[in-house]
Amino acid sequence: MSDERTLDLLEAKIQELRELNKVEGLDLSAEITKLEKKLAKMRTELYANLADWERVRIARNTKRPYALDYIAEIFSGFYELHGDRMSGDDRALLTGLSELDGEKVAVIAQQKGRDPAENKERYFGMVRPQGYRKAIRMMRLAERFGFPIISLIDTPGAYPGLESEENNIGGAIAASINSMIEVSVPTIAVIIGEGGSGGAVAIGAADRLLMLENAICSVISPEGAAAILGKSKERVKEAAAALKLTAPDLLDLGVIDEVIPEPLGGAHKDLQQTASALKESIIRNLGELSQASTDSLLASRFERYRNVGRYSILSG
Amino acid sequence: MPIFKDKQYFRVNLEKEADEALWLRCKSCGELVFKRRVRENNNICPNCGEYFFLTARERVESLIDEETFEDVSKPIVADDPLGFQDEKPYPQRLEEAQEKTGLPSAIILASAKIEQMPVVLGVMEFQFIGGSMGSVMGEQICHGMEEAIRRRCAFILVSSSGGARMQEGAFALLQMVKTTAVRARLAEERLPFISVMTYPTTGGVQASIASLGDIIIAEKGAMIGFAGRRVIKETIAEELPKNFQTDTFAIEHGMIDRVVKREDLRSELATVLRFFQEGRDE
Ligand SMILES: [Zn+2]
């Protein structure tokens, strides 16, 4: 049974041999090739048919690229705009002006922290009411000047705390969904890491919903589901599978439009490669949406969400 | 896999089954009280004023004019799109909830009158899997708003829900968007939407349709909020005030318009309906 640690160890070993090969003038190439093959095989075994729980772990991997990493790769410049004009500036949800492939766009992005200090500032990517109110402000601005909206989703969920509830986090999410529905410019949402419940939906109600291959989207965290069901912590993996939260599952269910491929092992193995696939997809989808008139854009968006759901019709 | 596949969708009526027990003991004051008197009193203890739980049927009955009830729900029942299984398969959970409540889903959708004014009324049933919102509830709420548009009347939604229905995964989550999208149509038509929050109005329901009322009224004793106490404690271990997520908390923090006693809810709804109805060109 291989896991990520074994792969990392093997990779390090191969690197070591390569160094030796150079310095000592020994011919270790046969050994290196053998190990490289083994590594490739193990990697495929581990990642090609990833268990749902493994994807959850990749989606939450602290080495995984975050929104600002993609923004730097994909857009030309990011002119950040701060604050909700009421109570503060949420650092877990960033908004700004940018250019994509020569076109002006408005960006709304959820951002996690890399280290404890940054995570303190960014509340581990959990958005508070002021974050959603800032997002709404950005949507209005985008609409006024006709900028398409690109929203990058990566949050465990809205911030669950007294401060959030006092400022009506539920009402802020509702208002944000409402703005997403009403805004008269093309909207594309991409789940790049965690799409946690209402906290993700708030900026996810777009014309196109895309997902990176190892991103997840769930109504509740696997841990939360396991807790509700009175299961022990070890049953979290089962909950992860039951929730159908992976990108391939959600594509099968018709909930998302497209899965954007990641390199074997996850986006963190090759940021450039992932970012370039992401960029290609956003540009292509935006191109399609830009063909439509505002009326037909809004009509299609309405139809899309009016019809979402699965049920059976019986004779009354 | 549809539930009740071989059965017909059944229309809800308000007829009560005979109840064997004549008396019940109030948990609040400890008095034995005559059950019929409790029922006639909106399920409020005649002795101490404690609110007993109202089923969706009882709630509908307490709000509308007699003999005006008509079930206008769509003949739909839940699917099991994820093949969800925990201790029980989801279809079994659904069947048990249907048995327990005598309802096809967690919401009653009716056309009725309140003080002679026509309304479309949706009432959630908490005893049906925690009143959770899945594809069926989302569709019924949208259908209710569209029915209100056809009938040129107000839409009232009485929430009692723990949030999105976990067993339907992303489909449940997207009902937040779906109901919001149709709610915008109701607004375009300038028809009033009154959201009534009762115990409890939380999670994905509070974070979408319930918070989008033109008027938001909370029943006294309601619980209103997004994240549950358990989640908050587990995530951030924060001390929470005694009145956390209560009706008083909600009104103090500007989340709702009014807190209304159960016995006054019907007349308050009538007051609001009358205000929005007057001067409307019909
Ligand atoms: Zn009593």
Image: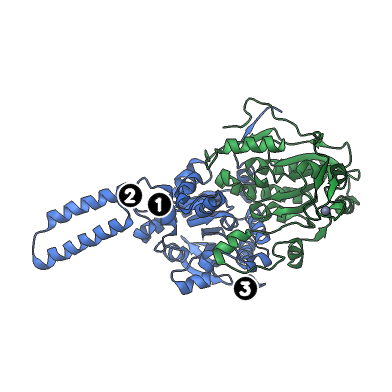
Chain colours: A blue, B green
Question: Would residue B14 be seen by someone viewing this image from the given angle?
Answer: yes
- The x, y position of residue B185, in whole percent, is 72, 48
Contact? badges 1 and 2 (CB < 8 Å): yes
Q: Nearer the viewer, mark 2 or mark 3?
A: 2
Locate residue B84 relative to residue A52 in the image: left or right. Answer: right
Determine which quarter of the picture holds residue A60: bottom left
Do marks 2 and 3 share a chain? yes
Dot 2: element:
helix
Contact? badges 2 and 3 (CB < 8 Å): no
**Farthest top residue in view:** B6
Is A75 rendered above or below residue B41?
below
Q: Nearer the viewer, mark 1 or mark 3?
A: 1
In which quadrant of the rendered image does the N terminus of chain B lie?
top right
Say the numbered circle drawn on residue A88. Answer: 3
Locate residue A222 relative to residue A164 in the image: left or right. Answer: left
**Cα–Cα gap, marks 1 and 3:** 36 Å
Q: Which residue is mark 1?
A: A54
The amino acid beneath tag 2 is Leu
Which residue is located at x 70 percent, y 52 percent? B209
Say the numbered circle drawn on residue A46. Answer: 2
Question: Would residue B79 be seen by someone viewing this image from the given angle?
Answer: no
**Cα–Cα gap, marks 1 and 2:** 9 Å
Q: Local crowd at mark 2 within 10 Å, few (<14), some, or many (≥20)?
A: some
Badge 2: chain ID: A
Do marks 1 and 3 share a chain? yes
Q: Local crowd at mark 3 within 10 Å, few (<14), some, or many (≥20)?
A: some
Dot 3: element:
loop
Badge 1: chain ID: A
**Cα–Cα gap, marks 2 and 3:** 44 Å
- The x, y position of residue A108, in whole percent, is 55, 62
- The x, y position of residue A124, in whole percent, is 51, 66
- The x, y position of residue B158, in whole percent, is 76, 49
